[in-house]
Amino acid sequence: MREGCISLLYKKGDKKEIKNWRPVTLLCVDLKILSKVVFLRLQSVISSVVNSDQTCGIPGRLLTDSLALVRDIIEYVKDRNVPLCLLSLDQEKAFDRLNHSFIMSILVNMNFGPAFCSWIHLLYKDCFSRIIINGVLSEPFKVLSGVRQGCPLSPLLFVLGMEPLACAIRQDCGITGIIAPGSGKQDKLALLPVGTLVEEDCRTVWRNVSASYLLNAHRDLAWSVVHQCLPLRSFLYRRGGTASPVCIRPGCLGEETVHHLMWSCSFAQEVWRKMYIWLEKIERKIVLTEHGILYGLPSIKISKEKFGKIWSIINCTKDALWKARNILLWKKCALSAEAVYALALSIARDYVARDLVHRSGDEVSKIWGLEREQMVSQIVLKC
Ligand SMILES: [Zn+2]
């Protein structure tokens, strides 16, 4: 019953290289039934004996979770400039190298009962294999190490075999690792710094960036603006994605950064000057500042409701500036500052429409500083 026939399945690469063949062991049906029974017993407890960072073959966990975690951690540390060293180790012939007496000592140390251990012992004691090559069976040989590829129990025994190494890594005080945000293991997420802003301002920035009254698209845009990560020319230039970092507006020689697009470009300044016409209807004393536009930091003390409207309009304008930039890039069509103002107004209609569900037209028109016809008329953009 414990004798298996190893058949080699070709993987990839040079066929003369033995490592390019996967040895799958064909086993008797009675042994497979027995190992499946043992496997089901082990599977029901495996998640409580190995740490949550092991995912192979464990119910409720997916191998792809580990891949997604590594990918997310890389993005996270890049985003926050956290130093990280990532070591990727590929275990060659992993299943074949698991020592049988090591597995037995792990089972004993993990407090598996003697009956369970004896079943595993039975499956691996004096087991033999033969190799099938071109239909010819080799002489049997004793298998001293490894779990069999093709046996349902093998992945879980391998997971148990890896746990002591994983424990040693977790307990090593020289390896601190990174606690993933949202994993529930950290006390609280540290406040992210924004440029040279003081902590209190950073708190306001992140609160305004994630304000629930903003459209999702505007929350994303505000987030990208604060992180300076819109795919603009300076951003792409640093990553070898474009030949020049200069602003795409004809005649403008500034570097196309987020700050330039949204604030310092002379075209952006022209658009913001037009926006005063509208914003001053909501708050007469309003002063638009770079910090207000990029980060949502109010320059004067105003009511929460008024600020919400102003911050929404600022985000509609940023959206319009971003769209106008892409229309210029891809359609070679330069919108005038007047057209960008009109575009921002048409984007803001989504916010106005949301208020119209709960309030009368006159009330909404007053809150948003809009004429009634501005709330309903269609704006036609001319290039
Ligand atoms: Zn420019």
Image (spheres, grey):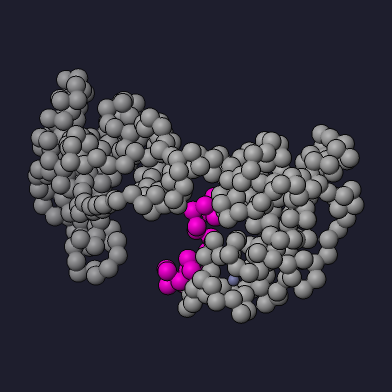
Q: In the displayed structure, does residue 345 sit left or right of residue 23?
A: right
Magenta stretch: give its range.
220-241
Q: In the displayed structure, does residue 140 sit left or right of residue 344?
A: left
Q: Residue at x 74, y 61 (%)?
A: 274
Coordinates of residue 83 in the picture (x, y in percent): 29, 51
Q: Residue at x 51, y 42 (%)?
A: 201
**Is residue 351 something that shows in the picture?**
no
Q: Is residue 293 above or below residue 255?
A: above
Q: Quadrant of residue 249?
A: bottom right
Q: Residue at x 29, y 50 (%)?
A: 84
The answer to whether residue 212 is magenta is no
Instruction: Classify the position of the N terminus by image quarter.
Output: top left
Instruction: Classify the position of the C terminus by image quarter.
Output: bottom right
Q: For this rendering, which residue is in front, 3 or 80?
A: 80
Q: Quadrant of residue 260?
A: bottom right
Q: Residue at x 25, y 56 (%)?
A: 22
Coordinates of residue 23 in the picture (x, y in percent): 23, 53
